[in-house]
Image (spheres, rainbow, N blue to C red):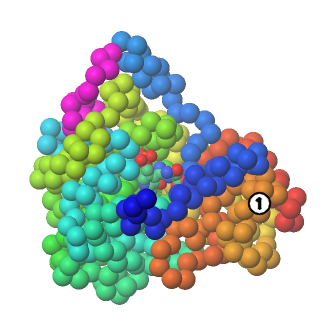
Amino acid sequence: MKPSNTVLSSFGTTIFEVMSKLAIEHGAINLGQGFPDEDGPEDIRVLAANATAEGPNQYPPMMGLPELRQAVATHDYRFYGLSVNWQTDTLVTSGATEALAACLLGLLNPGDEVVLFEPLYDCYLPMVKLAGGIPKFVRLDPPHWTIDPEKLKSAFSDKTKLVLMNSPMNPTGKVFSVEELQQIADLVTAHDAYAICDEVYEHIIFGDRRHVPLMSLPGMGERTIRIASAGKTFSLTGWKVGYATGCADMIARISKAHQFLVFTTPPNLQKAVAFGLGKEDPFYEDLKQSMQSKRDLFRSGLERIGFETAECGGTYFLNADISSVGFDGTDEEFCRLITTEVGVAAVPFSAFYQSENAKQNFARFCFCKKDEVLEEAVEKLAGFFS
Ligand code: PMP
Ligand code: GLN
C-alpha cells in the first residue's frame, strides 16, 4: 500500500477516544473525555425533534439558517456588545471543530507561522500542519498558566499569519486576563496578523469574572474570528453545531473552506440552537453556577485525598498533580492505572503537548458530571490513594 498522508500518519488515535474506550472496557467512571452526563435543556431537544418530524430536512443555506445566524448576532451583542451583521459576519459550522478547520484552511498558506499556546487542545496542531502552517509554541506553566510577555513576543515574526487561542482554555482551565488579551492584540496588530479565538467555554467561567472576547478589544474586530459551540453552551456535545463571528471579509474567506468541507449543518439542530441562544439570563447563570459548584465539590474531594490541583477559572476541567499523592510514574501510567484498577478515567496531561518536556505530573479530570458520580469517583480514588 502506498503511504497515507504524512501529517496524519504521525498522529495516533485521539486521547479522548483512547481513554473513553478504556473506561468502557473497565466499567470506569469516565472523567476523561469532556462531555456532560446529563443532556441539555429538554425544550431545545423537543424543538429539534419537532423540526425533524415537520421538516424540511433538506440542505439549509451554506452559511446557516437565517434564524440561527440572527440569534448568533443577537447573542454576541447581548453578552459582549459586539455589533455583528448577521448577513455578512456570521457562519454556522458543524461544531467548533469545523470552524477551526475552515479558519486554518481558509487563511493559511504553506509556510505561514501560527502562534499557539501549549498545552493545547488536541486538534489544533494536526489542523495547522495539514494547512501547511508552521507552529510556534508559547508555553504556559502551572499553577497560574500566566503568559510570559517576552516568550509571547518572541513567538511572533514577519512570517506570523495568525494566533490560535482558546479562552477559557482546555486543558488548563485558564481564563486569559484582559492584560494578556491586550498583549496578544498588540502583537497581532503589529504583525498585521489574524486571531482565531476558540471560545467554546465562554459561558463556563467562574466567580465574578466575565468572558472577554479578544474581538471586543479596540481594532481587533477586523482581524479576529470568534468561535463558539452549542455543544458546550447547551450540554449537547454530540450535536456538533458551532458558529463563527467575524468581519465580512474574514467570514467570506473562511466560508470558502466551509463550502468544501461540510457545506452545511443539520437544519433541525440549527433551528433548535437558534431558540436556545435566546434563553433568558437565568439559564446562562445556572450553567455557570452548576459547573462552578461541581468544580468545588470535586476539587475539595481531590484535596481531601491529598491531590494538589491547578487553578481552574473556567471550562469543565480540573488538573490534579499526581506527584502530590506520591505517584512517581508518568501521567499516562497514572491514568491507565486509575482507569483499570480504581474505576475512574482521566486524561494524561502530557497528551496536550507537542514540543519537548511535556508536563508529566498532571491528570485532567472532567467534572461536568452528576454530583453523585463525582462523589463516587472521589470515594474510589480515596480508597486507593488515602
Ligand atoms: N475547542 C475546544 C477547546 C474544545 O474543548 C472542544 C471540545 N468540545 C472543541 C473545540 C470542539 O467543539 P465541537 O464539539 O463543537 O466541535
Ligand atoms: N473537548 C473534549 C475534551 O477535551 C473532547 C472532544 C472530543 O472527544 N473530540 O475532552
Q: Position of residue 36 (x, y in %)?
A: 58, 42
Q: Verify whether residue 70 appears in magenta.
A: yes
Determine whether, in the image, residue 21 is placed left or right of residue 11: right
Count the labels in the image. Answer: 1
Q: Position of residue 143 (x, y in %)?
A: 57, 75
- Secondary structure under tag 1 reads helix
For image coordinates 55% across by 83% down, the residue present is: 357
Q: Is the magenta stretch mostly helix, strand or loop?
A: loop
Q: Verify whether residue 285 appears in magenta.
A: no
Q: Mark 1 points at which residue?
A: 338
For image coordinates 43% across by 59% down, the residue present is: 1
Q: Nearer the viewer, residue 311 or 369?
A: 369
Q: In this view, does 106 lie above or below 241?
A: below
Looking at the image, which residue sits at the far top?
A: 54
Q: Where is residue 150 in the image (x, y as percent from the top left)?
A: 35, 87
For image coordinates 59% across by 77% down, the residue present is: 359
**Is residue 325 at all visible to an observer of this figure?**
yes
Question: Which part of the image, by quadrant, shows the C terminus?
Answer: bottom right
10 Å neighbourhood of mark 1: few (<14), some, or many (≥20)? some
Q: Is residue 20 above or below residue 278?
A: below
Q: Is residue 336 above or below residue 77?
A: below
Q: What stretch is highlighted in magenta?
A: 55-72
**Is residue 166 at all visible to an observer of this figure?**
no
**Which amino acid lies under the numbered mark 1 shown in the image of this protein?**
Ile
Determine whether, in the image, residue 163 is placed left or right of residue 143: left
